[in-house]
């Protein structure tokens, strides 16, 4: 399970009309106890026909994701934060559509090998700019990704296999139905 705890969150909704004659305005500030914050703002029609939302993540700690990583890999998430901004536009209509323009970064990431505790992968910053995502039509474009101050441990064993192939936890194949 993934769990983040809100600390002193604020939510303001204004221009709320039961007849849906005008879009409501939303502003939420969500400080996260584990580190970082989430900001949400924008407008939406109460009937769900349309929404224009701005989302901002600032230094959201990735450490609550460590148990999920441990279920599937032989790696320990030692550090990392997520930041980003996104503009989401929803239109229901005859052909529903969702369009998103965003940028994101994962900073100060470090993954250690579970058994040895040694660094497996780290970077100071990974930044993605020009992220355009849409449903209706389905599309994903990422214009630029930059990684700075990266380091990794890559080993070739005597059997010519790589340590990269051994980081995943082995799973039992699902039995095919008879």
Image (spheres, grey):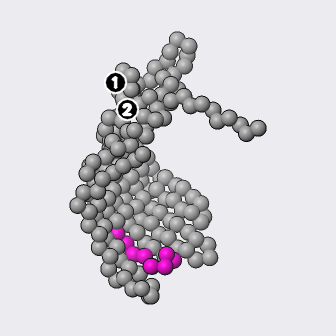
First along the sequence among labels 2 and 1 = 2
Check disc 1 and report its element: helix, strand or loop.
loop
User: Can residue 131 be seen at all in this image of the molecule?
Assistant: yes
Q: Is residue 14 left or right of residue 91?
A: left
Characterize the local packing of mark 1: few (<14), some (14-19) or many (20 or more) Cα atoms within 10 angstroms: few
Residue hosting label 1: 117
Disc number at residue 71?
A: none
Image coordinates for residue 23, horizontal then vertical, percent: 41, 81
Quarter the N terminus occupies: top left
Q: Is residue 39 left or right of residue 178?
A: left
Residue 122 higher or lower than 11, as above or below: above
* One can see residue 59 in this view: no
Query: In terms of depth relative to the viewer, which is nearer, 88 or 47?
Result: 47
**Where residue 118 sits: x, y (%)?**
34, 24
Residue 46 on the magenta span: yes
At a point 41% along the width and 65% down the height, the residue shown is 87
3D distance between C-alphas at marks 2 and 1 = 8 Å
Residue 175 x, y percent position in the rendering: 68, 35
The percent position of residue 131, horizontal first and vertical second, equals: 46, 56
Residue in the picture at 54% in, 56% down: 140
Q: Nearer the viewer, residue 19 or 146?
A: 19
Question: Which residue matches tag 2?
Answer: 76
In this rendering, is residue 53 above or below 22? Answer: above
Residue reaching furthest front?
178
User: What residue do we see at 34% from left, 60% from top?
Assistant: 56
Instruction: Based on the picture, tell me whether residue 14 belongs to the magenta stretch.
Output: no
Count of labels in the image: 2
Image quarter hosting the C terminus: top right
Asked if disc 2 and disc 1 are in contact, CB closer than 8 Å, the reply is yes
Which stretch appears magenta? Answer: 41-49
């Amino acid at each position: 399970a993934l769990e983040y705890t809100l600390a002193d969150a604020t939510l303001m909704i204004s221009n709320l009309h039961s007849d849906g004659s005008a879009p409501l305005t939303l502003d939420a500030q969500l400080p996260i106890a584990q580190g970082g914050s989430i900001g949400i703002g924008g407008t939406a029609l109460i009937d769900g026909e349309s929404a224009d939302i701005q989302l901002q993540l600032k230094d959201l700690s990735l450490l609550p994701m460590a148990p999920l990583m441990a279920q599937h890999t032989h790696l320990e998430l030692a550090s990392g934060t997520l930041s980003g901004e996104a503009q989401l536009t929803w239109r229901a209509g005859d052909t529903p559509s969702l369009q998103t323009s965003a940028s994101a970064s994962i900073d100060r990431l470090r993954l250690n090998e579970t058994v040895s505790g040694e660094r497996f992968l780290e970077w100071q910053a990974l930044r993605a700019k020009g992220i355009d995502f849409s449903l209706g039509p389905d599309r994903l474009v990422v214009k630029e990704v930059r990684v700075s101050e990266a380091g990794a441990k890559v080993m070739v064993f005597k059997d010519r296999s790589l340590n990269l192939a051994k980081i995943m936890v082995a799973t039992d194949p699902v039995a095919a139905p008879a």
